[in-house]
Amino acid sequence: MLMRYLAHLGGRSGVEGRTVEQQVLESNPVLEAFGNAKTVRNNNSSRFGKFVEIQFDKTGRISGAAIRTYLLERSRVCQINTPERNYHCFYFLCAAPHEDTQRYKLADARSFHYLNQSSCIEVEGINDAEEYLATRRAMDIVGINEEEQEAIFRVVAAVLHIGNINFAKGKEVDSSVIQDDNSRFHLNTASELLECDCNNLEKALITREIVTPEEIITRTLDPESALASRDALAKTIYSRLFDWIVEKINVSIGQDPNSKQLIGVLDIYGFESFKINSFEQLCINYTNEKLQQHFNQHVFKMEQEEYTREEINWSYIEFVDNQDVLDLIEKKGGLIALLDEACMFPRSTHETFAQKLYTTFKNNKRFVKPKLSRTDFTVVHYAGDVTYQADHFLDKNKDYVVAEHQDLLNASSCPFVASLFPTLPEESSKSSKFSSIGSRFKLQLQSLMETLSSTEPHYIRCVKPNNLLKPAIFENTNVIQQLRCGGVLEAIRISCAGYPTRKTFYEFVNRFGVLGPELLEGSNDDKIACQKILEKMKLENYQIGKTKVFLRAGQMADLDARRAEVLGKAARIIQRLMRTYIARKQFVLVRRSTTHLQSFVRGTLVRNLYECMRREAAAVKIQKNVRRHKARESYLLLQAATVTLQTGLRAMSARKEFRFRKETKAAVHIQARWRCHRDYSHYKNMQRAVLTYQCAWRQRLARRELRNLKMAARETGALKEAKDKLEKRVEELTWRLGLEKRLRTDLEEAKAQEIAKLQETLHDLQLQVEEAKTMATKEREAARKAIEEAPPVIKETPVLVEDTEKVNSLTAEVDQLKALLQTERQATETAKKEHAEAERRNEELMKKFEGAEKKIEQLQDTAQRLEEKATNMESENKVLRQQAVAISPTAKALAAYPKSPFQLRTPEIVNAPNGEVKSSPDVTPISLNLKELEAEEKPQKSLNEKQQENQDLLIKCVSQDLGFSSGRAIAACVIYRCLLHWRSFEVERTGVFDRIIQTIGSAIEVQDNNDKLAYWLSNSSTLLLLLQRTLKTTGAAGLTPQRRRSTAASFGRGIRASPQSAARPFLGSRLIGGLGDLRQVEAKYPALLFKQQLTAFLEKIYGMIRDNLKKEISPLLGLCIQAPRTSRASLIKGSRSQANALAQQTLIAHWQSIVKILTNYLNVLKANYVPSFLISKVFTQIFSFINVQLFNSLLLRRECCSFSNGEYVKAGLAELEQWCIYATEEYAGSSWEELKHIRQAVGFLVIHQKPKKTLKEITNDLCPVSDFEFT
């Protein structure tokens, strides 16, 4: 801001349309881009000192300018810490337009080593892309052309690529080579940007040449030395580039050797004290010590000279002199001298340098040696104690360029790069005089002090209110610390000790003359006037010099307060008079305006009155004509309405007469038809009486078959009891392997009994079918004879056709039973094969105790499949029972009319001698009721057809993926509402349940589609929960077999269970809210059968999802039990931090794959709104499976029982624990507890000092759950 003001004040036109003002101003953005960086305390901290001289001619306009820089922080190029950043130009270039980044082969800033050492890449409030364009514009204004700009940014990009070159150990001892292809790419790119030979660049980085009188010896560098060589090259290139930019700006702006005046602006770093302070902080604080001494001397000198010149009484003012600190640093034998001396000895190290400092300055009060360090030292500065780390002092103080780097870049084909590294003169190259950065900086600082001493200095101290870099926040402690470090408090103390306020006589009288205007009358001596004013104000301890009045601290404020009172009183008097004048002027104006307004309003009122009278007369005339017109229209409307009403009445009377005649004619016609129908019905009733007897006989046969089916159902119940025994035996097998053989024998006996019972049932059914065929043949022969002997009309009866269809239906049922028997035989053969396989595995398990649990699980799966087969057989028996009930439609119709006359009176059918069929006269009521039944069946058929269409529409709708609404399964809700609306739960026979089951079965044929399985699992569970809440068992339901136990115990407890079940909140929160209050419905047998089938499908879908998850994680479990050897070996090589991170990622890769699979399944189940208790059960069983697999693998593989593998498995189990926390207890349940065996086994592996642990401690304390056998 100061430079902008000075440049604007003395601006003039420059060359080529650029003014010196613009060039001076735009030099700041250029230098800030290449010399500023973000530090801990400042987002735009200058990492170099800058002194700008602005030269003025005789007329006061700028005639030239020069910029001198001091000590650029070169180490920042290759080393930064969080949250600092490297120099701004690197980030600007990475955010440049796409064509520029492509030209320089740059990528994101995070991909470069020199930039990604810090996590801070972007700074809030700074747009790197915009700053890049602004920097290019500033370069244009300063005078750097496009070609030079291109070369500058090419060199900057080359520095970034050089930083990404890494080295590995070579084949020879203490040699290095390029590490990988990525490093090779950056090496080639850097050589292209610098336009030098790639091989020479590689050679310059990994070798050194030692020149002897006899020969040149080439020495290879190890990887660490090669990295140091790489960083030295990058720092040298960037330092030379920065010096070239400064020189170019000075040449472009130009200097005026004939200038008469100049203003110098010194912008240099402030006092710095960090956790780690190096050579740069020492030089910066040395500079601040010099400036502080100059500041104190200047203030003290000015005070002393002014008091002497004014000849007032004053005493000596004491101030803190920091000359002893400067002597410690710059004097001969000081820090800089000792550092230069250490740099000249090849074998000097930072430790020897530190010991030299301890020995030399052990009695210096400004030098302190820390107690717990061998290389640190503390300097007591004027702003506080600063501890420096001497680790890199020697390297940073050496000011030389590696000869190989100098020769390489001097030979570059790019003139710009070659100009940065000009050929050194022969005498300078042969000179043995040592040059260091510290000595050169000391000389520069002495020159700066001489320049400052020859000028009149003005000091500006920049104080940062807070470290958060945010407005409206003031940190008192931080500000006081900055004022103390800047020497402001000391300057204020020196100033307050004297007379800080001083005014010339004229200025004092001109300012405070209002305090005593009467004292100024008749006197022209300002000195006497000042003395009178001070005496009147009763001030003390002031001094009056020759030309000025000297006041103590606070006296000026008292005078200003009295002056403000006098001026305030005078201002109030002026305001009073001015307000009076304004109010009077306003009153006169308002009165004149009021008179004019009243005159105008009175004229307007008179004109409005005349206009009102004229409008009233016109309105009377208009009203007369309007009323006449309305009366005429009303008369005409009434006349038309009367005519229309009369016409309608006459037409209605005519239509009524026509309707009466038409109804009379129809009644006569109906009577004729009714008489005809009555006679015809009498004939038909006689015919149907014959059929009634046949139906009664067939009903008797059906009841007999139903009785047989019930007996078969009771046998199925016995099969369930055998299954329960089998489950108990399988559970006992877990703890007693000795009973396994007897359980296997019992299982075979149960299968044999089951097959024998099925065969007996099949034999009975075959006998019944043969009897049915024999009876059907006899009835067919009798019917044929009756038809031949009956009148021709009787031949049209459809009885034989119906009988044939029934026989065919029975034949089809027999074929189905045969197919079922064949399926059961095949299942029995499969079970025998599985049983044989189980026997073989049992023999292996007798040899190996460790495989016992795996065999138990296989036997449980076998028992589960047998149980499912028994369930399917039970369902088929129920279907057969339902079909047996529905053998004859006529029987169902008869059942619907239990109180009709034909059930109370059996018709007597006799055969006449001539073969005709005759009925007794008592058959007439029966015939009439059958006729009525047929009349009622016609609308019933129409209703059935409509219901069939509705069912087709429901099946078509449900077969699609309807999704979810507010967490509710739409398909399940649609099915439930449709079945409830159609009253399907209350009918004895319906086919909609079978169609729904078939639709669900066809939807889950693809067992690998987890999304589809989860969708139908959610819908099935929702529908089953609704049925559980809605259906209640009636008395007739007691005829059905006892409900079977679910193979998955979780389903029996979670879905059918008590009010405390987890399904109840699921139903209440997600379903009842959208379906209203669920009412209880008395369910018939088909509804209960549908409920059991739905439960079986729910268990099947649940098992598919669980098995799919097991299949996916089973291959990974074998890899998770033993840590990869390559990952452990990699921990020994390379960088420890990077290798450890990479190895850790590699070690847990398989575990992360398992966690990823579990997360995917959890997301799929949650996305399909599967009840949480089902999700919890799935993952609980999966974690139990993981526990068994890992525990058995750990026991069977001895090489896995090591401490390192224990650590590896423990890390994987930690991943699973984190997943359980992520999944929450609602979905994970007790999954983590299922891993207790493997957790305790791993815990036993990773404990230290196992030999010191007793068996009791291991069994009771370390592994209370696991049952180990110690030998």
Image (cartoon, helix red, strand yellow):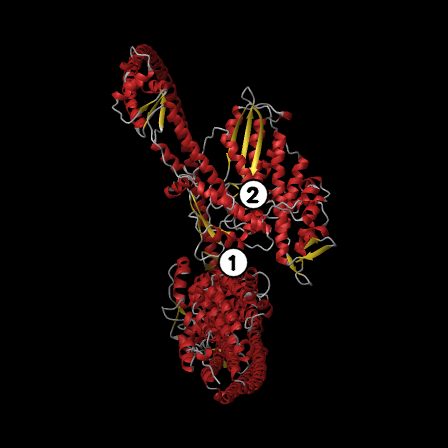
Which one is nearer the viewer's eye here, 957 or 21? 21
* Image position of 348 with respect to 693: above or below: above
Mark 2 surroundings within 10 Å by alpha-carbon count, few (fewer than 14), some (14 through 19), many (20 or more): some
Residue 53 in the image, given as x and y percentages of width and height = 55, 30
Q: Secondary structure at mark 1?
A: loop
Query: x and y percent of residue 228 in the render?
Result: 61, 53
Alpha-carbon span between mark 2 and mark 1:
83 Å
In the image, 815 versus 796, the foreground residue is 815
Q: Give the mark nearest the N terminus, 2 or 1.
A: 2
> Can you give x and y, in whole percent of width and height, for residue 826 in the image?
59, 81
What residue is disc 2 on? Answer: 439
Residue 718 occupies which quadrant of the picture?
Answer: bottom left
Amino acid carrying mark 1 in the image: Leu
| 39 lies above or below 1181 | above
* Vertical arrangement, residue 667 with respect to residue 1266, above or below: above
Location of residue 320 with respect to 9 vertically, above or below: below
Q: Secondary structure at mark 2?
A: helix
Q: Is residue 391 visible?
A: yes
The residue that disc 1 covers is 962
